[in-house]
Amino acid sequence: MKTIWLVIPCYNEEEVLPETAKRLLEIHQKLVNTNKITPQSKICMVNDGSKDKTWSIISKLHNENNIFSGINLSRNRGHQNALLAGLMTAKEYADAVISLDADLQDDINVIEKFVDCFNNGYDIVYGVRSSRKTDTFFKRFTAEGFYKVMKVLGVDVVFNHADYRLMSKRALEGLSEFKEVNLFLRGIVPQIGYPSTIVEYERHERFAGESKYPLKKMLSFAFDGITSFSVKPMKIIINIGIAVFFVSIIMLLYALISKILGFAVSGWTSLIGSIWMIGGIQLLSLGIVGEYVGKIYSESKQRPRYIIQELLNEEDV
């Protein structure tokens, strides 16, 4: 039997947390009773600077049953950093760690399959959505488009996989070697290597509360993932610059020939169109370059990705 920890990042999840704890405890007891995991296995909830009663609920769960462990970050650091804090803490106690969200959208009934795959020698098990029937057309179109764009840009990601995965202690040790501040774990984990497989599951509707990833945050997360793992946008800028340069030469020749032949006519529309087009390309290019420079700036400061304020955990259950 292996010791398995479940790590759940939480931000303002007071509405869903009691039900999440209840269902995960049922899964935990089932796996212990069938000798799939040890009684020392834990359910660890990471409070990412919540403004509601999330941490008090986690503390109460721990006091009532120390199968529940809690990590309280000093301030809100974002989902990826909160998840990393849980993974790096759990790797000191567990043989493998399963990460999942608190909203019960991830099908917890496949956790047993994750454990079986781990026992069969896989260091990383990816939870992959079998379909996106519960998503709106816009969400489905943008999400699948994101994964396809990432592939085109040369980023190694698992299609339709978020952060529902199992990682062995060895894989977590490999993850700890990645020191970047701008975290995009979906892109980092495949770079670790080691044997991996997938488990398909159906994603459910959110049990309660509101999504913590509105459109603006999703777009920011997607752009962060692209710029963290691919320099192709920079190469695209170069190619656009070369194309515009040749077009400008052609337009210059056209203007000179028209002048020589006496056909020069003041073209207000073409002039304004050209100014806006070139200006737009320049601003877009500066924005993309600025994003990369900003990442270099963030990485160079080497600030801590998270600070743990409080840890609730007893090794012996």
Image (spheres, grey):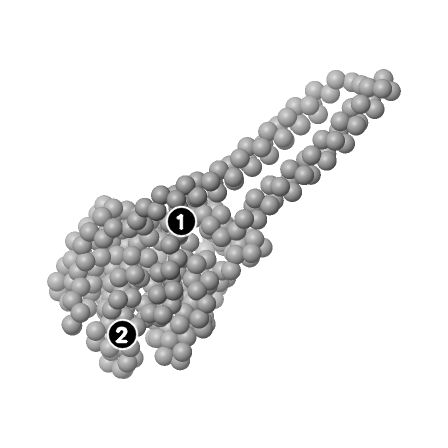
> Mark 2: few, some, or many residues within 10 Å (few <14, many ≥20)?
some
Q: Position of residue 100 (x, y in %)?
A: 34, 62
- The answer to whether residue 55 is above or below residue 292 is below
User: Which labelled disc corresponds to residue 106?
Assistant: none
**The one of 114 and 23 positioned closer to us in this rendering:** 114
Callout 2, which amino acid?
Answer: Thr
Q: Which residue is mark 2?
A: 3
Q: Position of residue 172 (x, y in %)?
A: 35, 65
**The one of 195 and 70 positioned closer to us in this rendering:** 195
Q: Is residue 295 visible in the rendered structure shown here?
A: yes
Q: Reading the chain from its start, which is encountered first: label 2 or label 1?
A: 2
Callout 1, which amino acid?
Answer: Asn
- Secondary structure state at the residue bearing disc 1: loop
Left or right of 317 in this view: 124: right
* Quarter of the picture holding the C terminus: bottom left
Residue at the image position 17 percent from the left and 64 percent from the top: 313
- Secondary structure state at the residue bearing disc 2: loop
Left or right of 54 in this view: 143: right
Residue at the image position 75 percent from the left and 27 percent from the top: 252
* Quarter of the picture holding the N terminus: bottom left
Q: Position of residue 262 (x, y in %)?
A: 85, 17
Q: Is residue 133 visible in the rendered structure shown here?
A: no
Residue at the image position 68 percent from the left and 35 percent from the top: 244
- The answer to whether residue 223 is above or below residue 260 is below
Considering every residue shown, the one lying at the far right of the view is 261
Q: Which residue is mark 1?
A: 182
Left or right of 200 in this view: 88: left
> Mark 1: few, some, or many residues within 10 Å (few <14, many ≥20)?
some
Q: How many marks?
A: 2
Residue at the image position 45 percent from the left and 47 percent from the top: 224
